[in-house]
Image: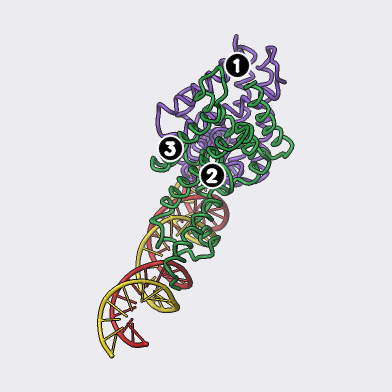
Chain colours: A green, B purple, C yellow, D red
Amino acid sequence: MKVTQDQAARNRELVVEAAGRLLRENGLDGTSVAEIMQAANLTHGGFYGQFKSKADLVEEVCERGLARGVAFWNRLGDESKDPLRDVIASYLSAEHVKSPGKGCFFAALACDVSRRDRGLRRIFTSGFRASIDALTRILKRPSPAPRRREAIAVLSQLVGAMVLARTIDDEALSREIAEANDTDIKERRR
Amino acid sequence: MKVTQDQAARNRELVVEAAGRLLRENGLDGTSVAEIMQAANLTHGGFYGQFKSKADLVEEVCERGLARGVAFWNRLGDESKDPLRDVIASYLSAEHVKSPGKGCFFAALACDVSRRDRGLRRIFTSGFRASIDALTRILKRPSPAPRRREAIAVLSQLVGAMVLARTIDDEALSREIAEANDTDIKERRR
DNA sequence: ATTATCTATAGATCTATAGATAATGC
DNA sequence: ATTATCTATAGATCTATAGATAATGC
């Protein structure tokens, strides 16, 4: 039963990883601790040796997940020829619509989070600020509007488009939502 | 205990009304049947005399709630001097941010719905089409972009702004999100 | 329509133990 | 190398709560 400290640390990572996927796919309430542990190939009871509570795990998962998203955008900002185009294309891709478990934490969980306690909401608030900063840096070519305001508008539009595209039960209409927003964001920045 | 058919029908309406508020405030999973019945001043058990199941009630509530939102926009479209301005101002108001129980079903429940069965998703899909039609009619002055595409973009932006504004645990930043999107939508249509 | 009840499932806790780690002895 | 201790995990169990049903009353 007992494993090396190293293996225990790896097991903990497996739990965080499985939770990251399941929570985004099925929601905060739609995912049980038992389910997460099963996905990590561990038993339910073992969970409480590594996390204080489910809420504790959720906070860790979201904090790390949001940071990952910001890092991805910052990397695009540094390395891409046309970072805004790449941000939009990846965000509004069909892949992102159909795989919430691998995608944006805002699109997957923001509605859930708005009903949760301060702790989790604060984590999302920090993640939001960092995301806006990343986007602001990406919107660097001359623009009539203040860049920060535009970053907020673009992020809102992206998140709304993803939430709606995932809700719609019609593949063609869902695609239309993603494409309309893709075109729209590009057009307005002519 | 037993009441007239008329009173029973009124009680049913009370249940639908209470559910409409509670489901939007606390989410589909965050609202119990017992809670809804209590809010309607009825007992838990009575629920199943009027609805087949909780899922059944949820469908009825969403269908009617979505239709109400569409009707509101159509009324603005018919009666307002500047319907787009009024749509945006009401949608992005501080009041709407803090009272999800009285607000847009997309902003309150779309994330939840994306994880539900076909029945409920189809209802939201119809509501989405009707909302886009209403918005398309409102966007009637000359525009370089196709009106339908613009309607989809504007609705996405509105929903995303509301979801994010409600998630953020900082009143000033939350206000900034609403105002940035308000200004942004107006600016792009100069 | 009320009241009591049933069944399922959730988060969380408890106990036992395999086996790793640390302390000790040669 | 031996012994003692520590700890990550398994498995069983507890408590609370959910949706739903059945029996009852007017």
Q: Amino acid at mark 2?
A: Phe
Please provide percent x and percent y for residue B134: 67, 22
Q: How many marks?
A: 3
**Residue B4 visible:** no
**Residue A183 visible:** yes
Disc 3 element: helix
**Residue beneath disc 3:** A126
Establish if B34 lies above or below B108. below
**Residue beneath disc 2:** B47
The chain letter under disc 3 is: A
Residue shown at 46% from the left, 36% from the top: A130
Q: Residues within 10 Å of mark 1 (few under 14, many from 20)?
A: some
Q: Residues within 10 Å of mark 2 (few under 14, many from 20)?
A: some
Disc nearest the viewer among 1 and 3: 3
The chain letter under disc 2 is: B
Which of the two residues, C8 or D22, is positioned nearer the viewer here? C8
Question: CA gap, disc 1 to disc 3?
Answer: 32 Å
Question: CA gap, disc 2 to disc 1?
Answer: 41 Å
Please provide percent x and percent y for residue A110: 51, 39
Please provide percent x and percent y for residue B139: 66, 17
Disc 2 element: helix
Residue shown at 53% from the left, 61% from the top: A40
**Residue beneath disc 1:** B84
Please provide percent x and percent y for residue B105: 57, 32
